[in-house]
Structures are given as C-alpha cells and as structure tokens.
C-alpha cells in the first residue's frame, strides 16, 4: 500500500463541495504531437475525506492506494473538481453629465449540493467626472 497525504486549502470565505478526487500517473514532459498515456490507480480507502471544505479552512486527508511502480519519466498527479460558480451583474447609469450611479451584484452558488448555499454581495456607489 501507498499512503498519500494531501492538503486542500480553501482561501475564500465561502464553503465548496468537492465532486471527485482521483490520482493518476502521467508523463512528466509531453512533447508536441505525442499520445498522452495515463494510468489511474483507484484508492482503496481514505481517512478524513470530506465533501464540503468550509471557508477559510484547510483539510488534510490520507488516501490508501494499491502498490504500483512509477517510472522515472512519470509522476503521480491528483485531480480534484469542486462545484461552484458566480454570477455578476454591473450597472452604470448617468444621473447627470458628470455624475454616474454604479450598482453591482454578485451571487455565488454551489452546484450539486444538498445544502444549497448561496452568498450574495451587493454594492452601490457614485462616480464624479471632473475635467
């Protein structure tokens, strides 16, 4: 068995869900016009695997992989997919020739989550044009 220790850090204030984590053995350098060969070992087990990574937190997980060899020209890589997205709306409108009203809104959301978390940011301001 190989025991792979990983650390995943969420620097944002919003929690994110992880869809999948997979390990693969890939080529170190891929020259142009060459077929890419990957081997994907399946994890036998894991310790402290979490689905949601809370905001401003770090999660450490240990994965158990079956024994295998890694040739000199290859390396072990980890893929991780996190659900999430953001929608931004910005509006600028002239109140007069020299005064502009600024409004923006951002909605951050998690996809594929049973919790259904949303985070909304709204801002408003004035811009004065001075010549």
Image (spheres, rainbow, N blue to C red):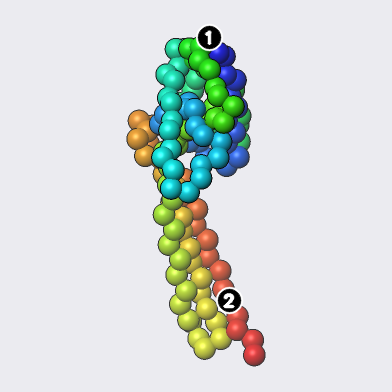
Viewer-side residue, 25 vs 59? 25
Is residue 3 shown above or below 115? above
Q: Please name the residue shown 47% across and 74% down the image.
A: 92
The answer to whether residue 122 shows anywhere in this view is yes
Residue 52 screen position, x and y as percent: 47, 29
Residue drawn at x 51%, y 74% is: 101
Quarter of the image where one finds residue 71: top right
Lateral position of residue 110 relative to residue 50, left or right? left
Instruction: Looking at this view, name the residue that lies furthest to the right.
Output: 131
Residue 126 at x, y percent in the picture: 56, 73
Q: Is residue 104 above or below residue 19?
A: below
Residue 1: which numbered mark, if any? 1
Quadrant in which residue 55 is drawn: top right
Which label's residue is closer to the chain start, 1 or 2?
1
Q: Using the image, determine if residue 127 lies above or below residue 114.
A: below
How packed mark 1 is, by other alpha carbons closer than 10 Å (few <14, some 14-19, many 20 or more), is: few
Real-space Cα distance between discs 1 and 2?
A: 62 Å
Residue at screen point 44% across, 58% down: 88
Which label belongs to residue 101?
none
Q: Is residue 17 visible?
A: no
Query: Is disc 1 placed on a helix, strand or loop?
Result: loop
Q: Quadrant of the C terminus?
A: bottom right
Q: Residue at x 59, y 27 (%)?
A: 72
Q: Tell whether 121 sits left or right of 130.
A: left
Image quarter of residue 76: top right
Q: Which residue is mark 2?
A: 127
Residue 18 percent coordinates (x, y): 45, 31
> Label 2 neighbourhood size at 10 Å, few (<14), some (14-19), many (20+)?
some
Relative to 52, does residue 118 appear above or below in the rendering?
Answer: below
Depth check: give the residue in front, 72 or 53. Answer: 72
Whether residues under marks 1 and 2 lie with C-beta atoms below 8 angstroms apart, the answer is no
For label 2, the SS is strand
């Amino acid at each position: 068995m190989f025991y792979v220790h990983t650390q995943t850090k969420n620097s944002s204030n919003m929690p994110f869900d992880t869809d999948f984590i997979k390990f693969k053995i890939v080529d170190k350098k891929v020259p142009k016009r060459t077929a890419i060969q990957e081997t994907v070992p399946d994890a036998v087990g894991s310790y402290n695997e979490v689905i949601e990574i809370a905001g401003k937190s770090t999660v450490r997980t240990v994965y158990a992989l079956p024994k295998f060899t890694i040739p000199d020209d290859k390396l072990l890589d980890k893929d991780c997919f996190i659900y999430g997205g953001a929608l931004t709306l910005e509006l600028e409108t002239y109140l007069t020739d020299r005064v502009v009203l600024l409004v923006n809104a951002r909605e951050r959301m998690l996809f594929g989550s049973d919790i259904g978390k949303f985070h909304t940011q709204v801002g408003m301001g004035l811009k004065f044009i001075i010549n």
